[in-house]
Image: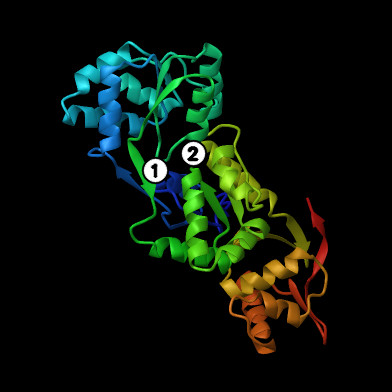
Amino acid sequence: MTAPAPLAGYVVGVTAARRADELGALFVRQGATIRYGPALRIVPLVDDTALHAATVGLVAEPPEFVVATTGIGFRGWMEAAEGWGLAEDLAARLRGATLLTRGPKATGAVRAAGLSEAYSPASESTAELLSHLLALGVAGRRVAVQQHGEPLPYFADGLRAAGADVVEVPVYRWVGPADPGPLDRLIDAVLDGSVDALPFTSAPAVASTLARARRTGRQPALVDALRARVVVACVGPVTAAPLAAVGVPTVQPPRARLGALARALAEALAARSPRLAVAGHVLQLRGQAALVDGELRDIPPAPMAVLRALAASPGRVTSRAELTAVLPDGGEQHAVETAVGRLRTALGRRGLVQTVVKRGYRLAVDRPHA
């Protein structure tokens, strides 16, 4: 029997707009099911007066330092300058400046434009980038900062506090999705227990998801679900900040890479899935399924809710009232009996779930399984 893929049985929600397919593919390759609900869309600002004014100003009065924060943003800036007939002049001014890039994508875009970076932090952190700039000394010097989807107030303010003349370059911005339907359905899936993990790649995506839940009266329930049951992973502390503000714990990889994010989330899911010896079999819960003696068994939502409740206190008798409370659509005693019957069928083994007369149900746990 072939071993199930590491994330088989789990459902991962993806809110990213840019690179959503790439992120989803990382989880699909490990066996997960993906539900997409974009929380953002990128609006280019090629015709924006603020971008044009910043570009003209930098051509007229060249900067001494230029910070490129994203590849897509830097390329968009060069393309916009080309459209305005300013590309050669802008490139000449940037060539005369000290260029700093936030990470590999920005570095690649800078080099593709025929330029070269003087510094790029290994952590891909804007905080480390700011520290490096401040250490170089920016008092009385002109610094251009290419923004990435939203203003970077702490970055620009930190430079200004050190005496720099800061020019902010807004290339594109993030706004809410044109159609919020997929995001609404993803939030509902989190609330009804059919999504096991949410990875986030940007703070605006987090903020937009929480804002949508708030506008539709679901934020308290969403925050509760993220705190108690869903594994939430973020590429770094900046992305995690809006979640930390509402008390949601997050998993973060050591490096801000999509691959590292996927590995950190997979490890966190595995850590939440202990194996139990039950009636002579090995049982392991996996989000929307269970492994029984290494065999993946798909389990419908109501029986899965019952199994989660029983496994939360292995071997303890769980009353019918307690089980009724965890069913996705509520119900009465008959609904619990039906869900237990379907659970026994789905598990495919006899004796895993025991009926304790007049008290409720329990898993027939032998002992914890290492």
In this rendering, would 253 be left or right of 16?
Answer: right
How far across and how far down the image is residue 77, in percent?
29, 30
Residue at x 62% of width, y 70% of height = 304
203 over 104 or under it: above or below: below
Could you tell me which residue is drawn at 39 percent across and 14 percent down? 64
- Residue at left 49%, top 14%? 139
Q: Amino acid at mark 2?
A: Leu
Residue 29 showing in the rendered view:
no
Tell me: 260 left or right of 90: right
Looking at this view, is 64 or 115 the one in front? 64
Locate residue 59, reporting x and y percent. Answer: 26, 19
Discs 2, 1 touching: Cβ within 8 Å: yes
Q: Amino acid at mark 1?
A: Arg
Residue 311: image x %, image y %?
74, 65
Instruction: From the viewer's perspective, tell me whether residue 89 is left or right of residue 104.
Output: left
The residue indicated by pointer 2 is 258
Residue that mark 1 sits on: 19
